[in-house]
Image: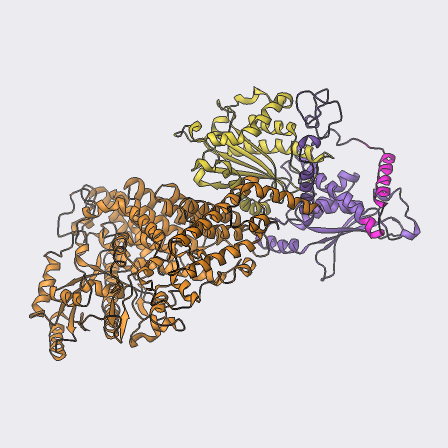
Chain colours: A yellow, B orange, C purple
Amino acid sequence: MSYYFTILSPTDVPLFNIAFGTSKSGGDGIARFRFPDAAQNTYMTQFIINSSLDMLEEAQWMSGNMYLKHIDTYPPASAYISAFLTPSGTRFVLLHQPPQPNIPASSSTSGAAGSMSMSLSASTTSSSSGGGLFGGGSSGRTSSSSIAANPTAPQTEEAVRQFMSEVYEGYVKTVMSPFYRRGMEIRSPVFRAKVSGAGRKWL
Amino acid sequence: MTSPGDAAPVKPPPSFSPGVPRVATKTRYPSQRRDSSASLESDRAEPRIGTSPTPPLSRTTSELPLRPASPHGRPARSSTPQAGRSSLGSPIDGRADAALETRSLIIRSFSPVIGVYASSDTDELVRQKGFKDGFWELIRPFGENVPGKLVIRDSVGSSRGWEDYGVRFVDLKESCQPPDGLNQGRNSSLGQVESVLEKQLDSPGTPLGGSVHPNDLLGLSTTSPLYKLYLRQLLSIATASPHETFRHPVASVIATSSRNPAPLESLRQLYADTNNGSRRVPDWIHPEYLRYYVLVHDEDRDDISESTKLYDQMKRHFGLHCHLLRLRSNQCVVTDDDSMQVPECEWLSPSERLLGHAEPLVDLDSDGLLYLFESDIMAIKSFVRELVAQSVIPFMENKVAVWNDRVASRRRGISGRFMSMSRKWAGFGSSSRSSLTGAGGGASGNYNVAHGFYDYDNDEALLRKMADYAFMLRDWKLSGSTYELLRSDYANDKAWKHHAGAYEMCAVSLLLNPLGMGTKTKLENVDQMFETACYSYLTRCSDAPNTLRCLTLAVELLKIRGGSAAESAAKWAMRAMDLGLIESIGQALFSERISACYASRAPVNGVRWGSRRRKAGMWSLFAADMWLRLGKPALASACLEEAERLYADVLGSDGVFPMPEMQTLVDNLRLSVKVGYLEARGLDIKEETGSTDPLDNEETSEKLDRRLNRRSLIVNPLDMGSLALPPVQPTRDEDNLGNDDFERA
Amino acid sequence: MAHPARHSSMVSMSNSIQTVTPQPEKQLPTPQIQTPSQSTPGLRVPSNRKTIYDRHLNRSRNAELSRASFAFLFGEMVTYAQRRVTGIQDLERRLNEQGYPLGLRLLDLLFYRTISTSSSSTLTSSSTSASPPNRPLRILPLLHLIHGPLWRLLFNRPADALEHSVSPDTPNEYMITDNDPLVNTYISVPKEMNQLNCAAFVAGIIEGVCDGCGFEAKVTAHNQPTEMWPSRTIFLLRFGESVMEREKVLERAGVK
């Protein structure tokens, strides 16, 4: 399972991006997206997420829940989109792509790994300092295999919800900062570490 | 309605093309074949009158409302590029037109097939007129659009008139080929479709090549002609096969001529051929189709009174299904006073189209076009109308009624269910009825497992035939319920192709039936049926062309339904792309189509949500990307513009994507399109000096100017200045910095 | 969703700021108060290695604050806002603008606290279940949210009244009444500034909450003294056109 998580402002501006892979069942935590065309790797995630906002905007007014669950699918890449909406209109969008057993993951996605390496390295360096709370201890959870297998299963929904809630906590703390203004990119490495920690813990 | 390809041979030689530039533009992109031919022979003030040669019999019918694509109906986007933006958001009537058009196209693709079998003297007569393939080739184009309104009664007795009815004339021997013959061509038939498209795009002489006006290609709400060509090609692939009867002859025209020394004997001989001789149909085609006898009278050489006498005799011997067709045997040339151009065939199979394109450029003397005397055309038209209205349709109506009574109602009742159940267990029941060839070989009822068909008089085959007749008579309610009846039978027999076909047509019938559905559950049903059909076609039978046809029908019909069905349509289109059935040009066309599906989803009134603008824009961009990779910057540019239009609502007022990598992609696409344009222009200048291309250049430059006025391009003023040079990335960045400065101040 | 005008203006503002100072090092994304750390560049990490992100947000939930310090702080804010203003309206606008971002932030905090304290049932006026609270989709729940939970968070009591405009011309106007606004308790307005109501700051907060929830609105504070409540203040909420349109659609769709 590969994940791409984005925080978007109410005006669709990305405030925070991170790509990571599952750490469950022996995953190494590195995202390996595969798209029909390797050249698309750099932009596809953003397009899919952006296009899912159509669905999000509709779901937003149909249910008052903050966690909107799985809202959209992009069939060509079998990418699934889950969304969480803060009361102030900021959107958390998680793209998840289950692994495909018959395609060796490493072969097709060298481009993706390259483009993501920046964010990843940032998160790994900072996790040494800030992310200690959720170390490797939680990686052995039993529900993990089902998450990877079925992106729309109730267990997956629950795991994503937990992840979103944890990110929400960090987000509220960020927003409370007097140095943070609405619509600003979130650059705190601690926040990034928190998010990737939550990813390790739940996804 | 028509594709640019149809118009290809019609391209006027320089001497004919009028001096008015707009006309020339139109002929390059004829939205309708008839218009393009109009510019040939008359000035464009009256394109219609000159073009659709209609006999007095149907003066009112020359304008068929279901055949839109008239130049007046098209959004005139090219002339008012800027005003478009805002107002184009809801081109409602245009959209409706396009939907009707596609619907009509699909309906007409399932037209009854009428075999043609003419005596050799008849063919000879017609060959004199310039038609190499004889009588069949002569009447073929006129069957595709039966003039006038045709009234059809459905199974419950209510009538409805259809303006766009057509039949398809085929050479009878095509129907008589064994099914093995098809299997060879099958794998390549999708490849052929792609080749047709390629040819269409690449040949510089045809309207689609080179520097075209892409807005006409990808008309906003209308369907692009290229896609229509693609769709028509897909729907034309099918040849007669056991699993559906659409390509089985419903009737056959048996023709002889006044030249024949013994016309009646000749007709008898021809009839015998169709029964037992060389034109005998295979076992899976019902042999009791309608025979229609035609006597072709040679106006130029023979005596009409003789022929009339002969005709009376014919009627005595063969009954009412006879016609006396009076034709002149002299060849008509364009300079003759009452010459009229023969309309082109709309429904050419991919292989025919590939063959056909090679010829017309060779012989400049006759410019590859065929002409007929007006009197001939009128005679043929009234013949076709009489044939269809008075013989074929009543024949089909009657058959449907009979079979419905004899087979279907029995099966619909409780006893019928019981019978089908018992048959399943014991292998008797309805099979005992089959009197002719012993079909009960397989343990599973009537299905001939070895050859993969039901004999024509088994219940399953009759029901299918009845459903297909009902479908072609546009009684979708009856056809739908009949297909539904058949589905389980075919599954029990493991007749997978039949099974797939029944599911496919059941869903199609449901979607075509205007009152058929609406609720969400039904939509899910339809989705499920298509799913099953695809699975059976592809996985069980590895029949790629039919799978693709099924998927395309699903896409188009669901799109027409609109609302959430349009979204489902987009999903099927993605599936089609995903299954690897489509080659590169098709992929680009399908991407455009997905975009159109999403774009057709209108936002909820009064609020922002409900539309799928971002998805539509995304697919438009992907299509642009694919066109660029195929080396078609003009088409890519059209897609790019469409994407801009779609994204306009969701992007900020500056038109910049919030996501950086999306913006990068769009910028790169724009750049490549521009470079592609400039290259194309350079090549134009190098290769063709003068001849027809002052117009072209004008068009191109107009296009470039216009694009520069677009908001999105204004962002980089420097690029504008350096238009002559290929724009480079660094300049861009400086510009952006400059803009920021400006904003800050 | 509707993009409130103010959101976009803020976004563009922050964007321009980012371009002015492109290096992330110059910005302090998180409020760190103590000595710089050695490991992560661009960020000062407290010596105990506990950043704000490691503290629990609910710890200060029931913490008391001296009224005096609040009064001083608010007084300073009014003084600050008063600099270079052209008139009372301008002053109120500036107070409103000071409150607006607070409203946006409070909204997130409010929901976060109700999620994380499962026992609490304070958010929606009627909710007693432990399920997470809903974002307000219609005007009425939003008003209840402001009237109840928001007021409790800010002032430890609900507001005093909630009314809908009776005039058919202004169906988009709602009023929230506070009989004795905390912000005005220690402020006596000079006679020549009779019109001024410093609760414009609170109006700004309300506006931020509305805007954050996607309800474009203008909120103003007005003096409506009575015998019993000399500093009674009415907050007038005027919702935008798009909000009213959406109200109708949602009503038809049966969304509560």
Residue A7 picture location, percent across and down: 60, 37
Kindly identify the residue that appears in the image at 50 percent across and 29 percent down. A113
For the view shown, which residue lies furthest in the bottom direction? B305
Q: Nearer the viewer, residue C174 or B419?
A: C174
The image shows a total of numbered marks equal to: 0
- When asked about the image quadrant of residue C180, the answer is top right
Q: Nearer the viewer, residue A34 or C173?
A: A34
Picture layout, residue B718 above or below residue B207: above
Kindly identify the residue that appears in the image at 19 percent across and 61 percent down. B133
Examine the rendering and report whether any part of residue A64 can be seen. Answer: no
Q: Nearer the viewer, residue B578 or B532?
A: B578
For the view shown, which residue lies furthest in the right direction? C191
**Would you say B224 lies left or right of B251 here?**
right
Residue B21 picture location, percent across and down: 43, 65
Kindly identify the residue that appears in the image at 13 percent across and 57 percent down. B279
**Would you say B12 lies left or right of B380 here?**
right
Picture layout, residue C134 above or below residue B27: above
- When asked about the image quadrant of residue B514, the answer is bottom left
Over which residues does the magenta segment extend? C63-92
Residue B470 picture location, percent across and down: 29, 59
Q: Nearer the viewer, residue B302 or C98?
A: B302
Q: Does the stretch in magenta take in B574?
A: no
Main secondary structure along the magenta-highlighted residues: helix
**Would you say A132 lies left or right of B73 here?**
right
Examine the rendering and report whether any part of residue C30 can be seen. Answer: yes
Residue B1 picture location, percent across and down: 36, 61
